[in-house]
Image (cartoon, rainbow, N blue to C red):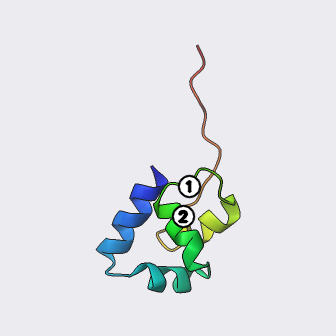
């Protein structure tokens, strides 16, 4: 899950939530919501955080039955 990825990468980088939010240019509340797994977040803002780790959201093919 994205929340687990962001949290583990943030901790591995030795960053607090405050520091990561500042580096990504997002609000602390947004980052907390992201790490808590909130279901409805703006994808462009999620991508600001993911970009710090060389990642981004994008379309993924889903298997069809």
Label 2 vs 1, first from the N-terminus: 2
Image quadrant where one finds the C terminus: top right
Q: Position of residue 7 (x, y in %)?
A: 39, 65
Q: Which residue is mark 2?
A: 33
* In the image, residue 43 above or below residue 49: above
In-front residue for pair 23/38: 38
Report crowding for label 1: few under 14, some 14 to 19, many 20 or more residues within 10 A (C-alpha): few
Report crowding for label 2: few under 14, some 14 to 19, many 20 or more residues within 10 A (C-alpha): some
* In the image, residue 25 above or below residue 38: below
Residue at left 50%, top 54%? 37
Q: Secondary structure at mark 1?
A: loop
Instruction: Check the image and name the residue furthest to the top.
Output: 65
Q: Quadrant of residue 42?
A: bottom right
Q: Position of residue 25 (x, y in %)?
A: 61, 82
Q: Quadrant of residue 49?
A: bottom right
Residue at left 46%, top 86%? 19
In-front residue for pair 41/62: 41
Q: Position of residue 56 (x, y in %)?
A: 58, 60
Q: Tags 2 and 1 in contact by the CB under 8 Å rule?
A: yes
Q: Which residue is mark 1?
A: 38
* In the image, residue 32 above or below residue 28: above
Q: Which mark is residue 23?
A: none
Q: Secondary structure at mark 2?
A: helix
Q: Label 2 to label 1, Cα distance in Å?
A: 5 Å
Q: Position of residue 12 (x, y in %)?
A: 30, 72
């Amino acid at each position: 899950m994205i929340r687990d990825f962001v949290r583990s990468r943030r901790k591995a980088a030795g960053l607090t939530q405050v520091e990561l939010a500042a580096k990504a240019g997002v609000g602390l509340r947004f980052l907390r919501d992201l790490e808590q797994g909130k279901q409805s977040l703006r994808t462009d803002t999620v991508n600001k955080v993911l970009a710090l780790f060389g990642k981004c959201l994008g379309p993924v093919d889903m298997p069809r039955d």
